Amino acid sequence: MSSLATLIKDDSLSSTLRIGVVSLAAFSVVGLAAYVGYRAAGPQNKTYALQNRHPESNEQIEKVLESLRLDDEKLRQIMQYLEKEMEDGLSPATHKNADVKMFPTYVRTIADGSETGQVLALDLGGTNFRVLLVTLLPQSRVELTSKIFVIPQSIMLGEGTNLFRHLAECLLEFMRKENLSLTGPRYPLGFTFSFPCKQEGLASARLSTWTKGFTCSGVVNEDVVKLLQNAIDEKKINVQCVALVNDTVGTLMACAYKDPNTAIGLILGTGTNACYVEKLDKVGTWDGDYNEPKQVIINMEWGAFGNNGRLNYIRTKYDEEVDLSSVNPGKQVFEKMISGMYMGEIVRLIILDLMQQDLLFIGQRDGYGDYSTPLFTRGGFYTKFVSTVETDEGIAFANTRRVLEDMGIRNPTFDDCAIVQHICKNVSKRAARLAGAALAVLINRINKPNVTVGVDGSLYRYHPRFKRNMEKCMKSTVSKNIKFKLTLSDDGSGKGAALIAIVADRYQRSQLRSVSSFDESEDEQIRVLIQQQPPNPVPPIVKATNTITRTLP
């Protein structure tokens, strides 16, 4: 201390030290003022930052997310309700007013891997459509060649006859390119037609309404298979459409070709639906024959489960908002809690709710005055963002930060990222548990020792935890004496459609053999066509840019 005093008294140093002390004091005052101002303007909850580093321990956040949680008791109640809705759909007395329609698809026989030969498929689901040649080889191997064609808008909006003529012309072009024989016995064709239809037979269905921008006249309430076949016959093409294909049934069939235990097809993508193999004596609406096999694949249309209010007790205010702002309020209630079209919007609504409660993006509200950003736009938080956010592990949150910045959130904090990921996990987990419980109903109903479920759709395919969460749910809801397996399907609308066509063709020929007038020589011709390569088969080489050739395992 004496040394310091001596220095201060020194005239040469005293002025410098005085300036330093005054400067230090000034900086301290400014820093203290800034800290006090920040604390005064900050949130009332002084432990916010510490609590939100583990959002599951924040009572206010958990109170918001608790409405999404489904315990086993709720799931079993949902399963009972679904079983009742299924019975209503299968009964002729209640089918008309049933929400879960349980439509018979008229597909009776399942692929078993023994199918061989060549079959065509046509997949129409939007502005583009595919023509496919599927070659079924021994040991359940498949070679698939396809070409994508465009449907001009003038045809989409014009007369229906022109649409089907366009399909036939493209089919003929494809067959010529692939050197397929244009004479002799007819090639069987499976037609995937992804528009609402009332199916009246395996190869008969009437269009209920156009969607996806199509308004072709003269098609609604008409048999679309007949319209396609007329156009094919007009071109004198040796092709017979033997099956109209639903994408869920195609998914089931594509998996069954490699796994004979497959009895369920499930779509988890933009929408959701399921089909399964049902015994004929349980299908009260069945209007076909009762010959072997005494079974039929049922297209459930389970997305409409809950339209009658039966699921209101598990719906949240976010579900209700999504429903009210949709194009079909009060419809597809189950689908709106599960599928990719709505999952991201549920997350967005929860984020906005937490922001309003000062639980998210604290202290940055003034920077978010631009309500044109995706965060404040309906549908602005895509479901693919949910998958992206949930892939983050550790503390970096690189993916989550990128998503939030794309949403218009500048410089999100660690806490912000942790909360948003927690929201995504809760929303997707609820969806997976609902899907798993519904699948458990079907597996228990089939009640076989081993059941495989063929699954397709972008949500199931790309979400990092969806399958795992479904399986966890199913382990507690599927009967203990049943082993189940979820298998990713491959090209249900293409490969599956072709398999349905060849199985349907085989079944129809087996029925013809029971008729005394059936020409066995004609059957032999068909058999040779199915089992052999075409006269000049095209080797599996790289084709034009819009033609795809691949061998499936």
Image (spheres, helix red, strand yellow):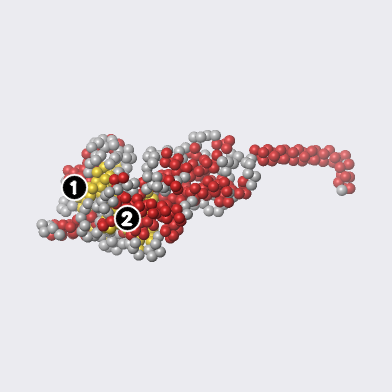
485 or 384: nearer the viewer? 485
Query: Which quadrant of the view contains residue 533?
Result: bottom left
Q: Amino acid at mark 1?
A: Ile
| Residue shown at 55% from the left, 53% from the top | 394
532 lies above or below 92? below
Q: Mark yes or no: residue 124 visible.
A: no
Lateral position of residue 45 relative to residue 147, left or right: right
Name the residue that disc number 1 marks.
Answer: 237
Q: How many marks?
A: 2
Image location (x, y in percent) of residue 541 = 30, 54
Q: Amino acid at mark 2?
A: Tyr
Q: What residue does disc 2 label?
A: 276
Cα–Cα gap, marks 1 and 2: 34 Å
Q: Which mark is residue 6?
A: none
Left or right for 424, reference 224: right
Residue lying at 88% horizontally and 39% vertically, measured from the top left: 11
Element on which disc 2 rests: strand
Name the element at disc 1. loop
**Front: mark 1 or 2:** 2
Task: Return the disc, 1 or 2, that comes first in the chain's sequence.
Answer: 1
Q: Residue 544 in the image: state x and y as whole percent.
A: 30, 48
Residue at left offset 27%, top offset 54%: 283
| x and y, in percent, of residue 33 in the image | 71, 38
Q: Say which of 455 and 408 sits in front.
A: 455
- At 46% from the left and 51% from the top, the residue drawn is 430
Give the image location of residue 266, x and y in percent: 36, 53
- The quadrant the C terminus occupies is bottom left
Furthest residue in direction left, as rendered: 517
Q: Residues within 10 Å of mark 1 (few under 14, many from 20)?
A: many
Q: Note whether residue 233 is visible.
A: yes
The answer to which image quadrant residue 219 occupies is: top left
